[in-house]
Amino acid sequence: MSSDQLFSDFFYSAPDGLKLHARIYGEANTGPWPVVCLPGLTRNARDFHELALHLSARSATPRKVIAFDYRGRGQSAYDPDISHYNVGVEAGDVLAGLAALNIEEAAFIGTSRGGLIIHVLGMMRPAVLKAIVFNDIGPVIEVAGLAHIQSYLERNPTPKTPAQATAAQRSVHVKDFSALAGPDWDRMVWALYRETDAGLVPDFDPKLIGTVASLDLTQPLPDLWPQFEALAAIPLLAIRGANSRLLSEETLEQMRKRHPGIETITVADQGHAPFLETGRLPSDIAAFLDRAERQDSSQ
């Protein structure tokens, strides 16, 4: 681990033998709950870099933070079988990584697909979940939001330089993310792409696009209310972008009714999904985790 990175790379084997990767921040931090960060569909561990630095080194309660690359993303190996790119397999991969790290329980932060994986973990191994942060995800996914994701993934811009990549991302997302400034877009590009001899390429298996393109959005999407309600005893913070097309205000209100202890934050001038390193979100997330752990220890 280099002093300027403040994280180490951890490689482990999935249950089917595929080589997977995670970043570990604050490896020496022990005592407080560790934090597991789970990214969105085509995203990777780099999405959580600034938040992980805050939680592991800058907050009042420094925690170990593990940010996962799912199979086919970031530094994890690509899967030759596209059918394995699903939340059930990915939940099993996360559990395998935690077992390799000897972590039996943790707080979880899930952005988009990461939140769906947390729903699955609640059915597979509920005892692993000590507290949950959902970033712009809930038990109901709006068709309009998925259609938007389908659209920009199908276009899949292929910029060759960081400047071109920033311009491409702004053109797609600026309407929903008017709160972002130049450095925010730069961080987004840094997390989305990797450099090759031929220029920048998206840092995920291109076959992932097919898993979204094949969805039939003319049919009702299944919801996860039973899985969500099974989380009712676990401290939960739900973050929603005010401009989100994936998580509706109506679903967030239903989440409040079905989880009596839920805390919520709506992020102004951001869409799907809010940048967790912006504004007060790092300190708000850290404070939520501290409250949840104090409450747990007093019981």
Image (tube, rainbow, N blue to C red):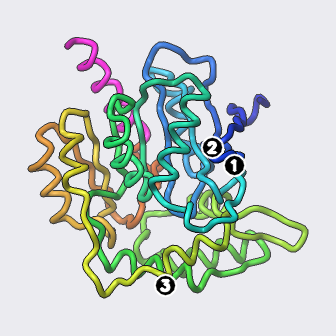
Q: Is residue 276 above or below residue 58?
A: below
Which residue is disc 2 drawn over?
14
Disc 1 versus disc 3: distance between alpha carbons?
30 Å
Q: Nearer the viewer, residue 14 or 117?
A: 14
Which residue shows up at 40% across the image and 73% down it? 176
Q: Nearer the viewer, mark 2 or mark 3?
A: 2
Q: Residue furthest right?
A: 197
* Location of residue 42 by image quarter: bottom right
The answer to whether residue 222 of the structure is visible from this angle is yes
Disc 1 versus disc 2: distance between alpha carbons?
5 Å
The answer to whether residue 181 of the structure is visible from this angle is no
Counting from the top left corner in percent of width and height, residue 58 is at 53, 27
Q: Indicate the amino acid at tag 3.
A: Ser
Counting from the top left corner in percent of width and height, residue 249 is at 19, 64
Q: Indicate the amino acid at tag 2.
A: Ala
* Location of residue 100 by image quarter: top right
Q: Secondary structure at mark 1?
A: loop
Q: Which mark is residue 18?
A: 1
Q: Secondary structure at mark 2?
A: loop
At label 3, counting other C-alpha atoms closer than 10 Å, the crowd grade (few under 14, some 14-19, many 20 or more) is: few
At label 2, counting other C-alpha atoms closer than 10 Å, the crowd grade (few under 14, some 14-19, many 20 or more) is: many
Tell me the quarter of the image containing the C terminus: top left
> Which stretch appears magenta?
282-299
Q: Which mark is residue 151?
A: 3
Please check the rendered image and state whether residue 14 is part of the magenta-colored stretch, yes or no: no
Which residue shows up at 17% across the image and 52% down it? 255
Tell me the quarter of the image containing the N terminus: top right
Q: Are marks 1 and 2 in contact (CB under 8 Å)?
A: yes
Q: Secondary structure at mark 3?
A: helix
Say whether residue 111 is left or right of residue 85.
left
